[in-house]
Image: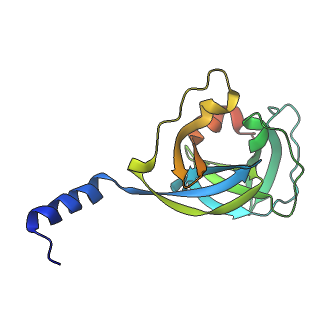
Amino acid sequence: MKIKVEEKQQIDNEVLNDPIIQWVTFYLADEKYGINVSHVSEVLRPTEIAPVPGAPEFVMGIINLRGTVVTVVNTRKRLGLPVKEVDDLSRIVIVELAGQVVGMLVDSVADVMNLKASSIEVAPSIGDDASSQYINGLSKQGDDLLILVDLGKLLPVNDVLVEP
């Protein structure tokens, strides 16, 4: 089967205009969330987290990551979900945002997913629901829904970082 030059140009334009974005996916409760892979530097097993008096309620404390002090956020608490004890599947996702490094405690990390930009839908407004303000978009994956998190809103650096 031969593709005509015009059809090939149209296919090339569709690929160029519909980039593929990679998302690191993780679970909180029974929902699957994603954050843009460009913000993720690594994923760690939870270690000892030192509490910081006077920190916001959703800040668990700090960890020492190879000589760097990293603030760790309880992502469930930040999203208004019930808190869960850390277990063998729990992970700390280390993200870089606005030149700062922050850890996000999640229930488990799933995988890296490739999504076409056109498959991302605008998140519906859900009124005063605390977690909806942190959602950047949604993507349907078969019968499942992937909730794409806006890290800039979830982790505003001035509200999250604990000074060493």
Between residue 49 and residue 21, name the one nearer to us: 21
Q: Position of residue 46 (x, y in %)?
A: 82, 59
- Residue 75 visible here: yes
Horizontal and vertical percent position of residue 115? 46, 56
Quadrant of the snapshot with the N terminus: bottom left
Q: Answer left or right for 157 relative to 11.
A: right
| Residue 101 image point, x, y percent | 65, 50
Which of the 4 image quarters holds residue 59?
top right
23 relative position to 62: left or right: left
- Report the side of 26 relative to 140 (left or right): right
Q: Residue furthest top?
A: 128
Instruction: State the residue lying farthest toward the left.
Output: 5
* Identity of the residue drawn at 83% across and 44% down: 61
Quadrant where the C terminus is found in the figure: top right
Which residue does the image show at 47% across and 36% down from the upper left?
Answer: 122
For the question of whether residue 156 can be seen, the reply is: no
Q: Is 3 situated above or below 69?
A: below
Q: Is residue 28 above or below residue 1?
A: above
Q: How many marks?
A: 0
From the top left corner, tell me how far across and down residue 24 is, in percent: 59, 58
Q: Give the residue drawn at x 75%, y 58%.
A: 108
Scheme by which the image is coloured: rainbow
Residue extending farthest bottom:
1
Q: Nearer the viewer, residue 20 or 52?
A: 20
| Residue found 74% across the figure and 60% down from its top | 67
Frontmost residue, 158 versus 108: 108
